[in-house]
Image: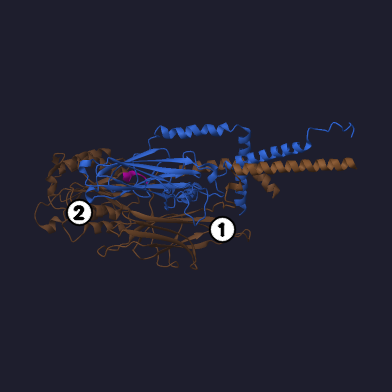
Chain colours: A brown, B blue
Amino acid sequence: MITRKRLTAGVCVLLATLTAGLGTALPAAADEPPSALVPKVELVLDVSGSMRTRDIDGQSRMSAAKQAFNDVLDAVPDEVQLGIRTLGADYPGDDRKVGCKDTRQLYPVGPLDRTEAKTAVATLAPTGWTPIGPALLGAADDLEGGEATRRIVLITDGEDTCGPLDPCEVARDIAARGIHLVIDTLGLVPNAKIRDQLTCIAEATGGTYTAVQHTDELSGRVKQLVDRAAEPTVTPVATEGAGSCSAAPELKAGLYTDRQVIGKHRWYRVDVRPGQELRASVSVSADRAVDNDYGVLLRAVTTHGREIVRGAESGTGRTDAISAGLRYPKPELDGEDGAEPPAETVCLQLGNSFSAPASVKTTPGMPVELTIDLVDGPDNASDVAAFGLGRGWWLLGAMVLTGLIAGLLTGWISRWRVAVWRTN
Amino acid sequence: MRTVRRNRLGRACAGILIAGATLFASAGAAVADDPSASASPADGGDAGPTEAGTTFRTATPVQQEQTATAGASTGDYLYWVFPADAGQRPTVHAKVTLPENATRHGASTWQVDVYDGLRRRQACMYGHQTRKAAPDANTVELSCVLRTVRAWSEPWANDPLPGSYYVRLTVVDLAEEDLGLPVRAETRVTSVDKGGAHDVDGTLSEPLVPGASSVARVSSGDGGEDGTAKVSLGSEPEDGWASGWWTDRWLWTVGGGVLASLAAVFGYNLTRGRGRPSHVPPGY
């Protein structure tokens, strides 16, 4: 033990440098550029007849949109593949059936030729209906393939009157395909119905809604959204939790997505070796109209059903998501040398207590994001204070007093001994 | 267990070395660091990022003392992530510049929420976490003072631990017509160093930064190439994470020991009187 202590003392400076070195090495690895992950964006522009209305900075909605598109096309980051889709651009007639299928890809998603794209946009003239649902479906197909971020930016001035396809349901279905697609919506008219529909679409996919009043706002916002697509993000892996622990998928460290229907549990399994710490966090997104009080519960349970630790959270009011997390450090095992001690299977049970009005569809389930980390276990505390050290004036007072008493006693004893020696 | 114990010994011996060095050098060095740390908040801090994320996953990293700004639409959920280390008590300040009065239709209530690296909501001890902006207000300012970050806590506790902290800023109540109007948001995190009084025993092996293990796997070489390298969702302080051995408790304890020995010498001298008694002849 003594030799070990000495050894430790010898390398303690080295240890400190190592720790510092590690700390700086990690972010370098994290900054590596994305490998073959090309972000894709599709701008979906409403070219329906109502775009003729002149109410944006004195010019027509269409020319405001065109001007914004020119600005945006100039500013698109090089790494982004951009496409343009129109709706209501071709069929001027009154036949609802035909008008509601009127959507086409104006410029294919791919490396951007700015002049070509601008020319294509310049040819547009306000014409037909507003089939938002089919346009979104088409856009989702256009963006098919690849693992990177996908964004649809929908610019419209009217609500989808085509039915029976509710664009909001369409958006939720697209999101549920598990292709990490976000729809941002921009409304050109401050009208309650349009706002409801567009916020619903945005909410269903984790996107944003913007009410546009000026041309510069329009181009600024679209630029911002396109830039957002270029931001490198982590792509989660889709998984599907099971109804019981025994059937649950086994997860390694990483980021996962899943869908959870209100009121149904989801189980996952993680193997934790002795000396490791499991860190799990989960977010359940409210992608539809839900009641005002809600909660989420994440439990770590042994295979025999004993609860180890739980993370719970509840909330009230407007929210995008509710999240909870837990950590479980599995103690190191003393015992057999050499043989690797077996990993413990920890079951993670996820439940949420969202509730929705009866008119809201509960399938597909709500988006779940799950982060699993496995790191070395913590260095557990053996005392409340750091290293059991003391602090404060009381400590100093007590130590000084003890020292004084010890000094006095020693002095008296030695004087007494001298006196005894002299008398003898 | 053995490695853990050795780590603790290592931490302790480094601490003793430094404590000794600090004792013998002047305590002025530590004091000299303080003015620079407290001076930076006064000059407004550096300009930080000009965008904000919209989910935990896309949260924009920002350092403490930086002012992060973002243009957004009313109703957006804006996310930033900042690192906080043990002993710090962070305060999140947020300011929202509302759309022009003419375009607004009523009062709005804004809220800032803070979550830790495990996405557990962290309580605000005080500050205006939620605030209602009057229909004619131009800005609304929010703040949230977190609890002091501890180096270690029980796994069953919700104490703030070193790692990433997420700031979420959003409107929680507003007139329907105001949804989607442009706003500007500004956020800034400052922190107070609470010193040794809050230094607890024990440390985490890794700060609570999401993706810590995936990043570590990549750096050790046996991770996949397929994007696992990017699974760092948090940020780390500019000067790295504290290693966990330093606490001013070393100074107090060692200083107490020195004082105690001085007191002992003093006490011993008291009992001896003024040297050798004069009537005792030499040679005894």
Q: Nearer the viewer, mark 1 or mark 2?
A: 1
Q: Can residue A164 be seen in this view?
A: yes
The residue nearer to you, when weighing A16 against B202, is B202
Spot the residue most to the left. A94
Q: Identify the residue at image location x=21%, y=56%.
A: A133
- Judging from the image, mark 2 belongs to the subunit labelled A
Q: Residues within 10 Å of mark 2 (few under 14, many from 20)?
A: many
Residue occupied by mark 1 = A331
Quadrant where the N terminus of chain B lies? bottom right
Mark 1–mark 2 Cα distance, whole angstroms, equals 56 Å
Q: Is residue A330 left or right of residue B90?
A: right
Q: Is residue B17 magenta?
A: no
Residue occupied by mark 2 = A132
Q: Is residue B107 left or right of residue B187?
A: left
Q: Identify the residue at image location x=25%, y=55%.
A: A200
Please provide the residue range marked out in magenta: A228-232
Expressed as whole percent of the image width and height from the top left, the position of residue A187 reads 21, 48
Q: What element carries label 2?
A: helix
Expressed as whole percent of the image width and height from the top left, the position of residue A381 reads 57, 52
